[in-house]
Amino acid sequence: MTSTLIPPATAQERPGRARLRGSLSPSRAADFLTCPLLYRLRAIDRVPEPVSAAAARGTVVHAVLERLFDLPAAERTPDSAAALLPLAWDGLRAREPELDALFDSAQELERWLASARALLQRYFGLEDPQRLEPAERELLVETTLDSGLVLRGYLDRLDVAPSGAMRVVDYKTGRAPGPGFEAPALFQLRFYALVLWRLRGEVPRRLQLMYLGSGEVLRHEPDDADLRATERKVLALWDAIRLATQTGDFRPSPSRRCGFCAHQALCPARGGTPPPFPGLAGEATATPAP
């Protein structure tokens, strides 16, 4: 999924807000909110990031939870999930052979697999998959706002009750945020809820984040005012992204998250120098990654 950033419309083209004519995913939106330079390095420069054991674990756990619901309800057990784990790992390795370099020994790989099994075991303490029949898994959703901005992303799971009420479920393999830090975590699900509302004309009944790292569930019940506010935030965010793209001004935003960033060597806040910005060489467009 890619998008094209186009310079703002002329005055003749826009009696009000210019049509944005681009696309945005919740991941890239979260990157810009966290650090504009991080957004630039990932979405515009597309600087490669080293593979990580934590990211690979998240990918295989998500794959297992997706495939778990392919099984008959009675077979959706912790043992079945554990049996699916090596298959998910083999599939990921086939797509990304460089992951083999993550582990120096069979013992190290087994410890990593054991940590993934522990996350899956914790999932069964949060809900009973034998009582669920998700309507969708790994669902691509996409809508175009009146402004012209395309919103798109993948839902981990969408549950639909017989009444038609929707529940958006997202799995996280980390720990739940502390009190007062829930808003950034919920932004992604509000983003998805906005897309579903625009697509289906109904506000999802519940948004649910399942934190397998700490065995906690964060729930939120949005309303249309909530999602209108989310749309305003997304539009303001996209205006900021467009302005940064026009000027090349993607400033770093230092925070405690910097210690986990793969791009510290390119960050001025850490004494680094980012690559030349491609949009400053007279180019009319840039093509951010999803």
Image (tube, rainbow, N blue to C red):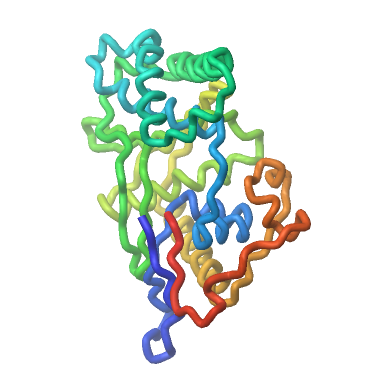
Q: Quadrant of residue 168?
A: top left
On-image quarter of the N terminus: bottom left
**Is residue 248 shown left or right of residue 12?**
right
Residue toward you, 80 or 141: 80
Say which residue appears at 30% left-offset and 34% top-offset. 137
Residue toward you, 103 or 111: 103
**Is residue 199 shown left or right of residue 1?**
left
| Name of the residue lying farthest toward the right | 271
Q: Residue 269: x and y, percent?
A: 75, 57
Q: Residue 89: x and y, percent?
A: 41, 24
On-image quarter of the C terminus: bottom left
Is 21 located above or below residue 111 in the figure? below
Residue toward you, 69 or 224: 69
Q: Quadrant of residue 72?
A: top left
Say which residue appears at 58% left-offset and 70% top-offset. 277
Residue toward you, 13 or 259: 259
Q: Residue 255: x and y, percent?
A: 72, 49
Q: Quadrant of residue 204?
A: top left
**Is residue 255 shown left or right of residue 15?**
right
Say which residue appears at 37% left-offset and 71% top-offset. 21
**Is residue 100 shown left or right of residue 67?**
right
Is 11 located above or below residue 54 in the figure? below
Say which residue appears at 38% left-offset and 47% top-offset. 193
Count how many numbered circles sit on residues in the image: 0
